[in-house]
């Protein structure tokens, strides 16, 4: 019994010493807090412009986004792309030293790791991310500009555009509605 009490006392002392020596981790900043409005379960409706001047393709899907430590958003998207089911993973965070939002995108239909860098507009409603990725011509990279616009707490819109001949052409719009 005495040994158990001594062991408990020593364990408490060690735990206290470890807690006192534990590093102080950074706390999420207001830029990280902006990302929290993206967290939740969402239904999606997409419009994909395959060819200018022709009606867009439409698709439905879903997204599930969670916070990772208050610093990152990890969002899993499920849907249909041109008749093929797909899953995509989006990560978004804020790099305080760079003063930039950073992100990645991977999915089950493309072997490309997309990396993003961007900022939120002065009104705090639109996160704009820029990237480079494969275009329709094999081996050629194009510039992409993607945005997430917060309409209200239950609605957001994702838009993807690519630069062609000095003009930004929207080719994908996704409307998100929070599941009730």
Image (cartoon, helix red, strand yellow):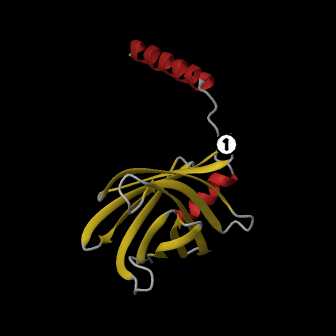
Which residue matches tag 1?
Answer: 98
> Considering depth in this image, is 84 or 69 the residue closer to the camera?
84
Drawn side of residue 106 relative to residue 115, left or right: left
Residue 74: in sight, yes or no? no
> Considering depth in this image, is 14 or 73 the residue closer to the camera?
73
Q: Given the current orientation, which residue lies at the most extreme left position?
A: 84
Residue at horizontal 30 percent and vertical 71 percent from the top? 80
Residue 104, image x, y percentages: 47, 51
Question: Based on the displayed image, in which of its 4 quarters is residue 25 positioned?
Answer: top right
Residue 113: in sight, yes or no? yes
Drawn side of residue 1 relative to residue 16, left or right: left
Residue 127, image x, y percentages: 61, 63
Residue 29, image x, y percentages: 68, 49
Badge 1 crowding class, 10 Å Cα cut-off, few under 14, some 14 to 19, many 20 or more, is: few
Residue at horizontal 46 percent and vertical 14 percent from the top? 6
Question: Based on the displayed image, in which of its 4 quarters is residue 31 positioned?
Answer: bottom right
Q: Is residue 121 above or below residue 22?
A: below
The quarter of the picture where the N terminus appears is top left
> Considering depth in this image, is 98 or 67 the residue closer to the camera?
98
The quarter of the picture where the C terminus appears is bottom left
Q: Given the current orientation, which residue lies at the most extreme front position?
A: 165
Residue at horizontal 42 percent and vertical 60 percent from the top? 135
Label 1 secondary element: loop
Q: Is residue 18 above or below residue 93?
A: above
> Considering depth in this image, is 94 or 105 the residue closer to the camera?
105
Q: Is residue 4 above or below residue 106?
A: above
Drawn side of residue 178 relative to residue 71, left or right: left
Residue 55, image x, y percentages: 40, 87
């Amino acid at each position: 019994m005495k040994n158990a009490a001594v062991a408990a006392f020593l364990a408490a002392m060690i735990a206290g010493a470890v807690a006192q020596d534990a590093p102080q981790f950074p706390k999420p900043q207001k830029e990280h807090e902006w990302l929290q409005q993206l967290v939740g379960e969402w239904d999606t409706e997409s419009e994909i412009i395959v060819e200018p001047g022709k009606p867009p393709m439409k698709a439905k899907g879903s997204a599930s986004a969670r916070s990772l430590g208050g610093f990152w958003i990890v969002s899993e998207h499920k849907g249909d792309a041109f008749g093929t089911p797909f899953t995509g993973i989006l990560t978004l965070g804020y790099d305080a030293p760079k003063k930039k939002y950073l992100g990645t995108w991977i999915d089950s239909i493309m072997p490309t790791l997309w990396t993003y860098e961007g900022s939120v507009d002065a009104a705090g409603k639109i996160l704009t991310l820029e990237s480079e990725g494969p275009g329709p011509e094999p081996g050629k990279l194009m510039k992409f500009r993607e945005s997430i616009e917060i309409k209200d707490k239950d609605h957001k819109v994702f838009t993807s555009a690519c630069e062609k001949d000095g003009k930004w052409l929207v080719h994908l719009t996704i409307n998100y509605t929070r599941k009730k």
